[in-house]
Image (cartoon, rainbow, N blue to C red):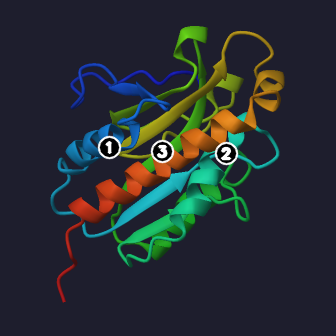
Amino acid sequence: MREPVQPSGSFFSSPPRIQYSHPSAKHQCANWLAQAIQLYPTASEYAILCIGTDRSTGDSLGPLVGSQLEKITSPNIQVYGTLDEPVHAVNLRQTLLKMRKELRSPRVIAVDACLGQLSSVGWIQVGNGPLKPGAGVNKQLPEVGQIHITGIVNVAGFMEYFVLQNTRLSVVMKMADIIAAALSLATQNCLVKPAH
C-alpha cells in the first residue's frame, strides 16, 4: 500500500495524479482511465477489484468504491470487493480464482488505498499495469490488475497499521466518491459490447 512504482515501458511515463478536492478530479481521473482502457480494445468484460477492509478506516477506500459501483447496471462490469464482501489479504487469492471461473479473460482494474509522503496525502493516481496490494504493510500478495487506481490516504514510514486505523474517514469517503464516479464514466464510455 505504498505509492506504486510504474512498470518500465508503461503507458504513463509517470503516474498521473490529482488531488481529490480538485474541481475536475472526477473527469480527469475518468480521462486517464479511459486512455488506459483503450490499450485493451478487444476486452468485452471488465472486473473492478476493490481491495481493502471495512475494519480499518484508511483501508476502507476499496470497499467503499466497490459498494458504490455495485449500483452500475452494465452486465459487462463485475465488481469484487464491497463493504459487505470485502477483498483483503485473507481472501485475495480465493477471489482471483473466483474471477477466473466466472469471467472470460477480463481486463482487471484494481483499486486500493496506499500510504505515501505527507505532501501526497489526498492524491488519486491512475496507472497502467498491476499494483501490489499489502506492500506498505509488508504482506506478500499477488500483483493484480492490468490497470490500477490508488488513493493516498495517509503517511507511510512508521506504524502503518496504526496510521491506517487513524485515517480521517471524511477524506477516504470523498476520495471513494471521486474514484467510483471516474470508474463509472470511463467504463461506460469505453466498453466493447460482446459478440452474440
Task: Give the vertical position of 88 relative to 150 (above or below).
Answer: below
- Residue 155 falls left or right of residue 15: right
Residue at image position (35%, 71%) is: 104
Residue at 35% across, 63% down = 106
In this rendered view, identify the residue nearer to me: 138 or 37: 37
Instruction: Identify the residue position indicated by label 3 in the image.
Output: 178
Q: CA distance from mark 3 to mark 1?
A: 9 Å
Task: Decide which of 65, 49 is in the foreground and name it.
Answer: 65
Q: Which numbered dot is residue 52?
A: 2
Label 1: which secondary element: helix
Tell me the quarter of the image containing the N terminus. Answer: top right
SS of the residue under disc 3: helix
Q: Give the residue displayed 35% in from the left and 34% down from the top.
A: 127
Q: Position of residue 26 (x, y in %)?
A: 39, 43
Where residue 193 sits, quadrant-wise, is bottom left
Compare residues 161 and 34 and report the one nearer the observer.
34
- Report the residue that reaches farthest toward the front: 23
Residue corresponding to mark 1? 27
Along the polypeptide, which appears first: circle 3 or circle 2?
2
Q: Position of residue 196 (x, y in %)?
A: 19, 89
Residue with the most extreme bottom position: 196
